[in-house]
Image (cartoon, rainbow, N blue to C red):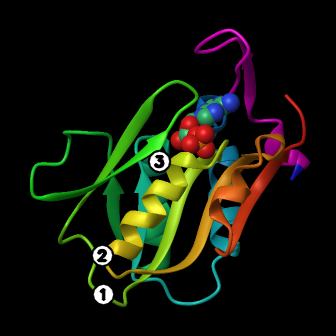
Amino acid sequence: MAELEKYIRSVPDFPKAGINFKDITTLLKDAKGFRMALDAMQAEVDGPIDLVVGIESRGFIFGCPLADRLGAGFVPVRKPEKLPAETMQREYELEYGTDRVEIHRDAIMPGQRILLVDDLLATGGTMAAAAHLVEALGGTIVKILFLIELTFLNGREKLEGYPIKSIITYDAE
Ligand code: AMP
């Protein structure tokens, strides 16, 4: 996917020193690049999907159009205190401290076939927490899909057993 990689901008030392931030805004603003990314992600989905679950906030950007393309509904996994109705919550470890993601308790019916989407896999903590919530509500995870994976952070280790696909991989900072 060398062609797609050209649309992604790397911003050194953002949001803090030592992080090489993969900026997708340069891809999103280009109609051809954005469509190419969605086409590549859609091509990885084989079976029928009931719901696309996207993680706030960049998971929404890819998850919503994919849901529409797949004829599926969309469910947001959000940062704390954003969802208005009753939620289920999951904490996960950060480099320093913890964070939390939430989902509406009535968002998924047992047995629904779920595609989980985020823009980027780094350490895997965020997606592992989201996957836990989906399964706690009885959803069946058909696939976990990322546009970008930073393979050197070994995020896959936290997602063992799930079918994972990322379109663009970076092997080093
Ligand atoms: P993680 O839980 O470590 O896998 O982090 C994943 C989340 O953090 C994703 O939602 C990404 O959007 C964001 N993220 C982490 N590292 C980067 C990075 N180097 N560039 C852009 N986004 C990142």
**173 left or right, relative to 24:** right
**167 left or right, relative to 80:** right
Residue at numbered disc 1 = 110
Residue flagged by tag 1: what amino acid is it?
Answer: Pro
Return the residue found at the far left: 85
Q: Are marks 1 and 2 in contact (CB under 8 Å)?
A: yes
**Residue 21: image x %, image y %?**
68, 24
Residue at numbered disc 3 = 61
**Crowding at mark 3 (Cα within 10 Å: few <14, some 14-19, many 20+):** some
Q: CA distance from mark 1 to mark 2?
A: 6 Å
**Residue 101: image x %, image y %?**
35, 47
First along the sequence among labels 1 and 2: 1
Mark 2 element type: loop
Residue drawn 89% across the image and 34% down it: 172
The answer, for residue 62, to whether it is visible in the render is: no
Q: Within the image, what quadrant is residue 23 found in?
A: top right
Q: Is residue 106 above or below residue 37?
A: below
Residue at numbered disc 2 = 137
Mark 3 element type: helix
Q: Within the image, what quadrant is residue 81 found in?
A: top left
Range of magenta residues = 2-24
Q: CA distance from mark 1 to mark 3?
A: 26 Å
Residue flagged by tag 3: what amino acid is it?
Answer: Ile
**Residue 15: image x %, image y %?**
58, 15
First along the sequence among labels 1 and 3: 3
Q: Are marks 1 and 3 in contact (CB under 8 Å)?
A: no
Residue drawn 66% across the image and 43% down it: 123
